[in-house]
Image (spheres, grey):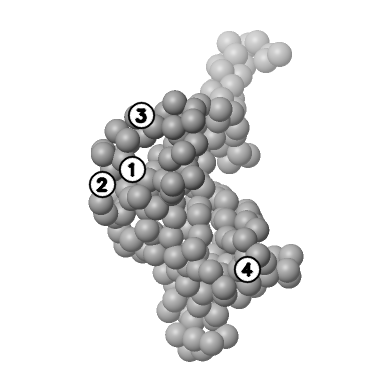
Amino acid sequence: MPRRFAQLTFTDSVKAAQAHYGTRSHNERYEASEATNAELGARESEFIAARDSFYLATVNETGWPYVQHRGGNPGFLKVLDANTLAFADLRGNLQYQSVGNLGGDDRVCLILVDYPQRRRLKLLGHARIIDLAEVGERAPALLSQLQIDDADATVERVLLIEVEAFDWNCARHITPRFSEREMQDVIDPLRQRIAVLEARLRQLGCEPP
């Protein structure tokens, strides 16, 4: 079920495009089915906790969007409660475009994709930057709530995201892809099975191929 997504994104221009392409009546039903709150449920929380990356979109003062990738081990994007996400923002290419954009407009869009299962979750929210240098002695307590995978990485800030809306996309046009970790989850049991079969062959006096 969509959660306030159409309310925030179906502008007059979007509705005009829907009418032009003959999907306005379909989207009216979509709007009618939409929940009025944006609380993340168990389904969304489990999906977010399993992701190892997401795309973060911001917009600058001239109206240009900027999309950046964020990644880590599953769980690095933390669901703090039914309306709040957080992650440790690591030092990157030193351009600070996402951070700079948030200084002028705190609205963000996140897209999270499960490529093997062809599932996609879109979230809209307001982001708040917490610079660790400014919180001082409270920084360790803040970071303890988050997952920091790289001990050598420099965490410069924490981003808190208050979720305003979300929606699940259909699976159409999502090409299945598998990460190294996901491939390893498939390959390791096969290797163990092969090792067992080879051991049995040796017991029978046969040399494995």
Cα–Cα gap, marks 2 and 4: 32 Å
Q: Which residue is mark 4?
A: 61
Q: Which residue is mark 1?
A: 2
Q: Are marks 2 and 1 in contact (CB under 8 Å)?
A: yes
- Mark 2 vs 1, N-terminal side: 1
Compare residues 78 and 62 and report the one nearer the observer.
62
Mark in the foreground, 4 or 1: 4
Cα–Cα gap, marks 4 and 1: 29 Å
Q: Is residue 191 visible?
A: yes
Query: Going 35% across and 29% down the picture, which residue do you hit?
Result: 26
Q: Which mark is residue 199?
A: none
Query: Going 28% across and 43% down the picture, which residue do you hit?
Result: 34
Given the image, on which type of amino acid does mark 4 rest? Glu
Position of 4 with respect to 126 (left or right) is left
Q: Quadrant of residue 95?
A: bottom right
- Mark 3 vs 4, N-terminal side: 3
Q: Which residue is mark 2?
A: 35
- Mark 4 vs 1, N-terminal side: 1
- Mark 1 vs 3, N-terminal side: 1
Q: Is residue 49 visible?
A: no
Where residue 161 appears, as percent x and y from the top left, is 44, 64
Q: Which residue is mark 3?
A: 26
Cα–Cα gap, marks 2 and 1: 6 Å
Say above or below: 188 vs 46.
above
